[in-house]
Image (cartoon, grey):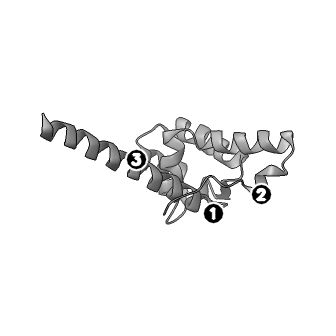
Amino acid sequence: MLLTAEPCPLMEGLSDQALIQVAQYFSALAEPTRLRILNCLRDREHNVGELAEHCVCSQANVSRHLSTLAKHGLVAREGRGTSVYYRIADPSIYALCDLVCGNVARQLETQAAVLTGRNSTS
């Protein structure tokens, strides 16, 4: 799927304050651990300990990242007894992530093909 550089009508009418919020939303995604957390939450909810284990991070580190994700409305939390479980609050995040990941994968394939072509002609 090719993406064109057509103007985004939704973006054109945004105020400076709204654009700042959009930039902050994207900044919440600009950290590999947060992307790992979102990927872990794709199928089901998890508590901090489970996420720390999946992401090979400390619970304190995962909690800090979850706080950022929650602040931007990407995850929701629910306390159950002594545990807190996190789930995706905005499932549309996966459409965005899949779009970006697909684009990055295509770029890497193109780069690999170029490098392979250079190496085979040497």
The percent coordinates of residue 4 (x first, y second) are 59, 56
Mark 3 packing: few (<14 Cα in 10 Å), some, or many (20+)?
few
* Kind of residue sitting beneath label 2: Pro
Q: Which mark is residue 108?
A: none
**Residue denoted by label 2:** 9
- Secondary element under disc 3, as helix, strand or loop, is helix
* Kind of residue sitting beneath label 3: Gln
**Residue denoted by label 3:** 107
Dot 2 and dot 3 residues touching (CB under 8 Å):
no
Of the two numbered discs 1 and 3 in the rendering, the one whose residue sits closer to the viewer: 3
**Residue denoted by label 1:** 92
Dot 1 and dot 3 residues touching (CB under 8 Å):
no
Please state which of residues 89 and 46 is positioned toward the viewer in this rendering: 89
Please state which of residues 43 and 2 is positioned toward the viewer in this rendering: 2
Label 1 – label 3 distance at C-alpha: 23 Å
* First in residue order: circle 2 vs circle 3: 2
